[in-house]
Image: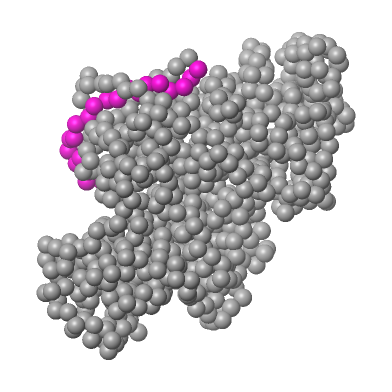
Amino acid sequence: MNKIVSKEYFSANVVKLEVEAPLIARSRKAGHFVIVKIGKNGERIPLTIAGADLGKGTITLVIQAVGGSSKKICALNVGDEITDLVGPLGQATHIEKTGTVVCAGGGVGVAPLMPIVEAFHKAGNRVIVVLAARTKELVILEEQMRVNSDEVIIMTDDGSYGTKGLVTDGVESIINRERVDLCVTIGPAIMMKFVSALTKKYDIPTVASLNTIMVDGTGMCGACRITVGGKTKFVCVDGPEFDAHQVDFDEMLMRLSAYKDIEKK
Amino acid sequence: MTIEEQLTIRRTEPWREELRKSIKAKDRSTIERVHMNELDAEYRSHCNKEVNKGLTPQQARKEAQRCLDCAKPTCMEGCPVNINIPTFIKHIEAGEFLGAAKVLKETSALPAVCGRVCPQEKQCEAQCIHLKMKKEPVAIGYLERFAADYERESGHISIPETAQPNGIKIAVVGSGPAGLSFAGDMAKSGYDITVFEALHEIGGVLKYGIPEFRLPNEIVDVEIGILRKMGVNFLTNCIVGKTITYEDLHNDGFKGIFVASGAGLPNFMNIPGENLVGVMSSNEYLTRVNLMNAGHPESDTPVLIGKKVAVIGGGNTAMDSVRTARRLGAERSMIVYRRSEEEMPARIEEVKHAKEEGIEILTLHNPIEYIGDEQGRVKQMRLQKMALGEPDASGRCRPVAIEGAIETIDVDEVIVSIGVSPNPLIPSTFQGLKVSKWGTIIVNESTMQSALGDIYAGGDIVRGGATVILAMGDGRRAAAAMHEHLMIINHP
């Protein structure tokens, strides 16, 4: 069960795993996530699905080794099994033909953006992808993005590849030159906060896929709650995608740091 | 044969007639009710060991003598799973402890669980004849636990008989008390049962909710093991409605589905500061500690260890949470409840145990705001003092705010335990189910059948929040009704 059939390093800390999960591969849609747990004493952590292969019965996960649990997952090799894997969870992305869609991804958030780019492109939209990373080595999935979109703009913090600047600079350059009907953003919470602030200024509908702390992931514990439009929402069952302009990102950032002190110990 | 006739036949067996006559009813009534053996309060409030230690065989037999073996056992009317109470108690009196356990298993899939967590004082024991004579009721719950524990520890665990397999596949959604009870009864009737569980462990609320010090997981696992031996299949990490659909179950040949998907999203009060770090639901807190083993060095799951912990609510889950906080090292752990102690829904035993362990009970207080520090961590709560007014729809006195009476208390962790709404997954993915405005699945109360003919439901997904034993009763009723329905279809 849940056997890893391939492993690829996108960079020293970012790993792509293809995992045998035929039932999830069959039922998942763009935007869905899974919960994984490694070992008997492992933690349950959410990961957005980055793709699936129906023929092989596999799903793709892209993980950045940041905390104890993500390091454990990244250390798994081909032939190893993920102890517990459950999904697909959450609401799928609402895909429709709307015109021009800008998809802005940062860091490892580019991976779950992939199926969304693919789906919007297939639905007949003009899709422009902005890929942002600190430096050239951390730019991932560029080729696949090019195949599935109309244009890819690369932004790096240090200017080692593409244009020097932040993801918001890339998005704003598009807004300045043409009409944008929808923006989708996935990445670190702080990045999504700034993308959201930018598109709000231009009144462009924006969807953010949020990655909060979860325990069960099935609508039971409430650890993932956030405030959207002044109301408490649960990322695991109401999300993970929300109207970015309504999300209280400052509160979300604060809640994401809940266990920072414990993690450090 | 009616249930009354069955009862009479068992009651008039020669051994039982003789046993009944061996002690006069009057003498039976003068025996004092047994006291549960418990761990020392100070010792237990720093460890996770089970608080109640059970009865010794001598204590159990003596307590069993108190039972008058009534011709019309009213206690049974108080039991949602219709345990043949006098019969199992008389087996204990006769020293036939394994026989007593067998009687329990005729109608209950989880006797060692029920003997620990059922509110017997509101059910079977509330109907005991002794109460009519102004005496304490027979300790039916303690005796149930004794028989189940004796059997488990004896190594001679009996597996209930199952009918010849009939090859009919039945799916159960959720492996909590309702699902397990249903699975046990249907397995006895010869069905091919598969239980689908969303989490990585079997047992539902028995595992993620009820703490080790009240219900050790090992005991739950033994009872699940018996169901496995009866042929019940369990599949973890599978969410019906997500991983597999209603249609998939049909295509795989399942002829009936029992939905027991349990509790869902925790309720919050929607007051300022409720999303601060350090404020969480009891579901989250207890799941981290009980299911994920947080707090143990070998577990990867973290949990906030509060020094000043407030638990909001007065139910069993609130008591479980506050007692857990104490065990994790809280110096001050308190219940904050808006009515008085009399209205608390928690079991009296839990409140008693909590107090013995140094839990403060702050009644007639209601939180109105949580205040955070510069990092967004809760540091204080503002409490509105309340007074009791007229009784409300539930019959309990309505708490009324005393204007201007507000106090501020320092806290570094708040656990909100004011109930849950039903799990939204099944109602939102099964087209055609009738769902109430609270999100519960609407069923026929006697058959537990839903608007979709092959789907039955029970437990919290129907009741919105109840007890283990009521959930188990639902499972039994659904099993009986589904069995009857399928037999009519297959043998018209």
> Which quadrant is the N terminus of chain B positioned in?
bottom left
* Residue at position x 79%, y 26% in the image: A127
Q: Magenta stretch: give its range.
A: B375-397
Q: How many marks?
A: 0
Instruction: Using the image, determine if residue B237 lies above or below residue B185.
Output: above
Residue A92 lies in quadrant: top right
Tell me where residue B432 appears, x and y as whole percent: 54, 54
Residue B137 can be seen, yes or no: yes
Instruction: Using the image, determine if residue B298 lies above or below residue B31.
Output: above
Tell me where residue B369 appears, x and y as whole percent: 36, 23
Q: Which of B472 and A262 is in front in this view?
A: A262
Q: In this view, does B264 lie to the left or right of B86?
A: right
Q: Is residue A35 left or right of residue B302?
A: right
Tell me where residue B64 appears, x and y as whole percent: 25, 71
* Residue at position x 66%, y 13% in the image: A198
Residue B203 in magenta?
A: no
Instruction: Using the image, determine if residue B441 lies above or below residue A109.
Output: below
Residue B386 in magenta?
A: yes
Tell me where residue B89 appears, x and y as whole percent: 29, 73
* Residue at position x 27%, y 25% in the image: B384
* Prevalent SS, magenta region: strand
Residue A30 lies in quadrant: top right
